[in-house]
Amino acid sequence: MSNEIEVKGATKLFDDTRAISNLNFSSVKGINIILGPNGAGKSTLLRCIDGLYKLDNGSVRVRGSDPYVDDKVRKEMSYLSDNYALYDYLDVKSNIIFFGRIYGMKDYEIMEKAKGILAELNATQYINSKIYALSRGTKQKISLCRALINDPQILLLDEPTAFLDANSSDSIRRIMQRFGKEKRTVILVTQKLDEVTRFNCRVSIINKGVIVKDSSTTGLYSTILKDSFVNIRLGKPVGHDIVKKTPGFISSNDKAATMLKIKVDSYKDINKAVEYLIGKNAFIISIDYIEPLIESLSW
């Protein structure tokens, strides 16, 4: 089946609040990103896909089955929530074994699998630690281990890099990329534009409980770069009189001009600025776009 997940006309109410409303979504093999601001319905959608919530209207099908009633299809999935879903007063080993047994795994199978995952996440040393004693970032690593223990074919991730340092975040992204290459289905929900642009994949934009746009990483860049700003850091000063002629120039940090801000509308504008500066014997150290708040974007 090409579309492992099919959501049609899905509506979920909490009292009088519509968390998602007549929402349609279908997955593709590999990595799927659902991007949206706080309160857009991202987590609710994931929980409906995982079978944790019963819809008020519409349907969710995972591999052709309703995950709310089909235990078998839920065993092929795993969900990393945004609140760890671990038992605070059990140690890491006991937590992992508990969840592994739910999937019908033997204890030795669980620990053999867990050791490899924890090593990849640089968290092996916490195997006997109580959950409550761990940092938020380490809890996130253990929670991911718990989510991967059943070797899922469908992986649902709710802000998986929250509270993690750069190295740990990269480890999670490598796992996602590996799953994608293996043609498994990964659904990542996030509100971070920077997180999205680290992948080359399909992106669905959710806002006010509805998927409002299907795009891609490249298409997203076309949206967020329009009327955006880029900071260019130079290795040595070239003089304000030179940098102020840079295409799109807005301002620089001082007369020495080792940092300048330019306005861009597309990739080409960045290239023009870089080509000009190199032509003036400038040494470019870094180029960083000033990430807009997702709430400020219109779709």
Image: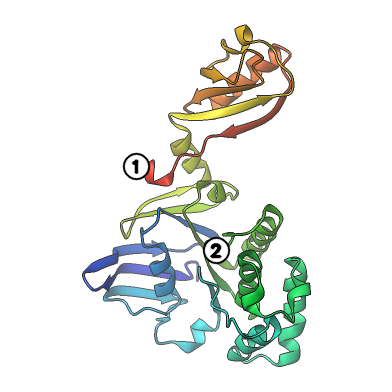
Q: In the image, which is nearer the foreground, mark 2 or mark 1? A: 1
Query: Is any part of residue 151 visible from this angle?
Result: no
Identify which residue is drawn at 58% across, 90% down. 102
Identify which residue is drawn at 54% across, 16% down. 247
Judge left or right: residue 90 versus residue 249: right
Query: SS of the residue at dot 2?
Result: loop
Q: Dividing the image into 4 quarters, which one contains the C terminus?
A: top left
Disc 2 or 1, which lies upstream in sequence?
2
In percent of width and height, residue 142 lies at: 65, 73
Residue at mark 1 = 298
Label 1 packing within 10 angstroms: few (<14), some (14-19), many (20+): few
Q: What residue type is disc 1 on?
A: Ser
Displayed quadrant of residue 133? bottom right
Residue at mark 2 = 29
- In this rendering, the answer to whether 295 lies above or below 59 is above
Q: Residue furthest top?
A: 241
Judge left or right: residue 239 versus residue 68: right
Q: Are marks 2 and 1 in contact (CB under 8 Å)?
A: no
Between the residue at mark 2 and the residue at mark 1, the CA separation in whole angstroms equals 28 Å
